[in-house]
Image (cartoon, rainbow, N blue to C red):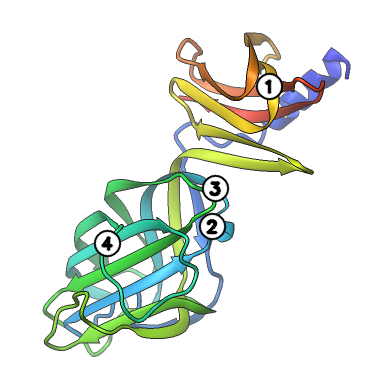
Amino acid sequence: MKKSTFFYFLLFGLINFIPLNAQQQITIGSGTSTWYYSPITRLFEYGASETIYDASEIGVTGTINSVGWNIVSSAYATPTGNVSIYMKMSTQSTITTTTNTTGYTLVYTGNVNNDVLGWQNITLTTPFQYNDSTKNLAVLVVHASGNYTLSPPNYAYSNVPDKSSYYYSISNAWNETRTMIATPNRTNIRLSFGNLSTVEIDGKASVKYYPNPVKDIFNISGSQSIASVDFYNLSGQNVLSQKFDSKDISINLSRLTTGNYLAKINYKDGSSKTVKVIKQ
């Protein structure tokens, strides 16, 4: 490919870069039916829900900074108190009616607002590292608010069998001895990612690059041996080049200024791949 042609595609690709401070939101589920048992039920004083979202539905890896659920009707002014949100990566693909917090990370504890219709996004107190694209994401939500309403918030859900369970009680808080109720009603979820890792597959070849956005160390790994990597800025200038002889490499980008770049990955077999990189 001629140099001028490469720069044309370079500039064209940069048009679609996301802002430097943006996070990528992944929404799973598009169903419009509603119910009030999951993720948090306000019809009862105590409740819990466990949900599995498949890796193929998430499509990226990175740091999950917030989680959200869509309240469609009956927003309730009083916040839900004593809410604990747990996350874990898991090979489990089918829900069971018994669960515990083993393997889970407590990512949020506190009150949750439910007073506005639409997506209610909760910033995690402990961002969750979802860093294995082969594993599913399990989300366990437990609340012991101690109060209820006869008009609880209704959340949008999709019909996905064997992925969700829930628990509710007037007087008994959830613990690992409680039996959950399996349901095909899986609540739609929105995950906000930062420090993304992207996996791309072209034919039999695959490449993974992360984090993106990146502050200093940028990692590339894949199924082919890498010969070199060239970084280009918005003006088409080659601002950094390094040679390698490995399938797994790390590059220090700390000396690059904040901005958008394209990284051209050159393989030992003569092929190449260009990916977008955001430098913070």
Say whether marks 1 and 2 touch (CB < 8 Å): no
Identify residue for label 3: 60
Q: CA distance from mark 1 to mark 4?
A: 39 Å
- Mark 3 closeness class: few <14, some 14–19, many ≥20 residues within 10 Å: many
Specify whether residue 10 is in view: yes
Q: Percent position (x, y) of residue 98?
A: 31, 78
Q: CA distance from mark 3 to mark 1?
A: 22 Å
Specify whether residue 155 is in view: no
Which sits earlier in the primary sequence, circle 1 or circle 4?
4
Say whether marks 3 and 4 touch (CB < 8 Å): no
Secondary structure under the numbered disc 1 in the rendered image: strand
Identify residue for label 1: 226
Tag 4: amino acid? Thr
- Residue at image position (84%, 15%) is 4
Say whether marks 2 and 4 touch (CB < 8 Å): no
Identify residue for label 2: 55
Tag 1: amino acid? Ile
Secondary structure under the numbered disc 3 in the rendered image: loop
Q: Percent position (x, y) of residue 103?
A: 30, 57
Q: CA distance from mark 2 to mark 4?
A: 20 Å
Q: Nearer the viewer, residue 11 or 104?
A: 104
Identify residue for label 4: 102
- Residue at image position (61%, 42%) is 199
